[in-house]
Amino acid sequence: MLRDPRGGAGHGTAAADSGLMSIGTVLNVLRDEFPEVTISKIRFLESEGLVEPRRTPSGYRKFSAGDVERLAHVLRMQRDHYLPLKVIREHLDAMERGEVGPLPRLGRQRDGETAPEESLEVPTAARIGRAELLAAAGIDEAELAEWESYGLVVPLEPGVYDAEAATVASLIAELGRFGIEPRHLRVMKAAADREAGLVDQVVSPLRRHRNPQTRAHAEARAKELAGLTVRLHAALVQTALGVRLP
């Protein structure tokens, strides 16, 4: 339950300020439930108005417990209900006004027909436009075109991307600050494709099942396996480099 969705930005005493968290601390807290979350993802959600952390005089983000709870709520709605950010923001704003209601439902249904409550068909994943992707990653058309040429960012259809593409683009941009060029990242893309293929081998029989509950279970299993492969990949990289990430 969200007690203070906005985290009370701009309010509170010095005692409350002492409980504020850095973005790195927030990342560690969220990764217990969302192992795939990144700092870029948190920054993107902030840019979309889903969370409003306080800023120190030097410009550092400081998150309250309410901010972290709000972020977790957003990530759950994306993960469990595949809701677009615009819909999530409107839902949270309605909750702030005390207008508590059921989550919006996405999915295909005939005109005038209400989707049955027991339906477990997986709805369409959240999508973003090209301009939204460019703004979220802070890049220009030429950079995005180059990344697409290497297969690092792949549109679902012309000008339309999966929402996670914003996280991918932001990470590519951050790596570029260290001199790592997009062409260097093709090996990472190939490894990710192989890992995705391994997960797909496990869940594809479930996805083809006629039972909607079994197909929904396939998506949950895919998310769980994806999270485990991400954690394993990170651990292997850390071991190879002899470093430990925060």
Image: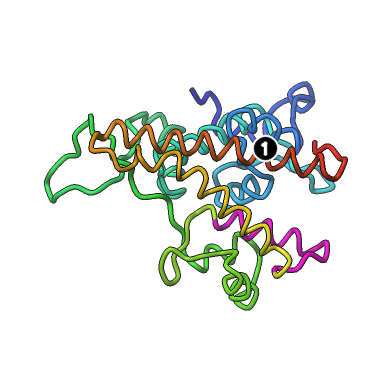
Would residue 35 be found to the left or right of residue 85 on screen?
A: right
> Which residue appears at 50% of the width and 42% of the height?
199
Kind of residue at badge 1: Leu
Would residue 22 be found to the left or right of residue 187 on screen?
A: right
Would residue 52 be found to the left or right of residue 19 on screen?
A: left
> Which residue appears at 84% of the width and 47% of the height?
58
Q: Which residue is mark 1?
A: 232
Question: 179 or 87: which is nearer to us?
Answer: 179
Would residue 68 be found to the left or right of residue 238 on screen?
A: left
Q: How many marks?
A: 1
Q: Main secondary structure of the magenta part?
A: helix
- Looking at the rendering, in which quadrant would you find the C terminus? top right
Q: Indicate the secondary structure of the residue bearing disc 1.
A: helix
Locate residue 146, reporting x and y percent.
Answer: 63, 75
The magenta segment is 165-182
Q: Report which quarter residue 61 is drawn in.
A: top right
130 vs 65: above or below: below
Locate residue 216, reporting x and y percent.
Answer: 34, 35
Query: Is residue 174 located in the magenta-colored stretch of the structure?
Result: yes
Locate residue 116, reporting x and y percent.
Answer: 19, 34
